[in-house]
Image (spheres, helix red, strand yellow):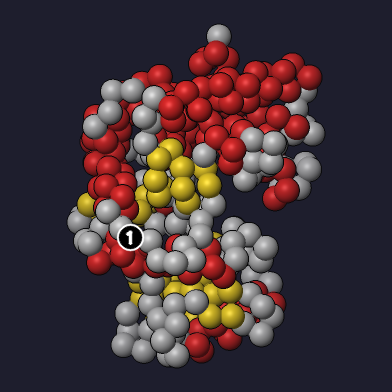
Amino acid sequence: MTDPLRNEADEAATLWDARLLRLILARENAVFEIALPGGDRAALRLHRRGYQGAEAISSELWWCAELATLGLPVPRPIPSTQGRVLETLASGRQVSVVAWLDGVPLGAAGQPFADNVAVQIDRHFRLGQLLRRVHEASAGLILPLGFSRPRWDAEGLVGEAPFWGRFWDHPAAFPDQSAVLIAARDALRAELPRHAAAGGKSGLIHADVLRENVLVSDAGLSLIDFDDSGFGFLLYDLGTVLSQNQYEPARDDLRDALMAGYGTDAVAMVELFTMARIMASVGWTMPRLAQDDPIHRSHLTRAVMCARRLLG
C-alpha cells in the first residue's frame, strides 16, 4: 500500500471515529475494512478522483439507503460523526462508509466457478430474482432533486462518446479485430433504439453485476459496489452478469437460470446486452491499464468471440 493512500485512509477513518483494519482492494475505489466505535465492521471507500463527482456519489448513497430501507440486501451508507454520508479529505478525495455485508464473492474474474454446475445454476436463478427486486423497488422511488448518475443507454454504450470509451478504437486491436468491434458497435446502434421503441424497459440499474460484486452467505445473495450504477436498460444488468460466463461449459444453462429468476424469455436481447457489456469492458481498459497489461488482449479476444457468435 502506498503511504499517501494509507495516510488518506487514516484521515478518513477519523471522520467516522473508526479504526482502520486492512486494505480490501485498490481498484476504481480504494476500499478498507474499518471497525466503528461500537465494534461493527464497515467498508471505507476512498473514491477514485475524476470518476464520479460529489453529486453522483451522494445520489448513489441515497439510492442504496432507500433500497436497504426497503429490505434489499445492499450496503447501507453510514453517516460520519458530523452526520454526513459523504466527506471530503484535505486532498480533495471524496470518502464514504457503508455497512459491512457478510459473504464470499460469487466467483473470481477470469477463473472458472469453484462450485459445481447445479450450485451455480441455483445461484444464478436467485441472482435473477434479486435483480428483479432491485429494479422493481427502484422504479417505485421518487428521486430527490439533483439526483445524478451516469447513463447506460444507447448513447452511453455506443454513442460518439460512450461512458467507458470508444471500444472500437482500441489501439491494441488487430485490423481484423477492429472490423469486428465496429460491426458490433453498428449492430448495437441499430438494435438498442429498436428495443427502446418496442417498450424495452429502462430505469436505475447496478450496471456492474460482476462475480466479485455478488456476495454469497447463509442468508442468501447480496449486491455490493454501486459505483457504476446509473440509468440504463434493465436487461443490461443481466448482460453484466453473463459477460464473465463466456468460457463456462454451462454458459447457456447459467443464462437461462438467470433469465428464469428475473422473469424474462428475451434470449436475443439478453445476448445483445451481454455483448454490449463485453464491448464496454474493452473501452474500460484503455485509460486504466498499462499498455502491456495482458487484460487488453484477453478482453479483445473475448469481445471478438462474443460478437462473432452473436452476429455470425
Left or right for 3, reference 55: right
Q: Residue at x 31, y 65 (%)?
A: 66
* Helix, strand or loop for disc 1: loop
Query: On the image, numbered disc 1 is attached to which residue?
Result: 142
Does residue 123 sit above or below 81 in this rendering? above
- Residue 284's spot in the image, x, y percent? 64, 44
Looking at the figure, which quarter contains the C terminus? Answer: top right
Q: Residue at x 41, y 86 (%)?
A: 83
Left or right for 267, reference 13: left
* Res 122 quadrant in image: top left
What amino acid type is highlighted by mark number 1?
A: Ile
- Residue 263's spot in the image, x, y percent? 24, 32
Of residues 83 and 285, the one drawn nearer to the viewer in this rendering: 83
- For label 1, the crowd category at 10 Å Cα-Cα, with few meaning under 14, some 14 to 19 and many 20 or more, is few
- Residue 20's spot in the image, x, y percent? 49, 81
Does residue 239 sit above or below 185 in this rendering? below
Left or right for 78, reference 109: left
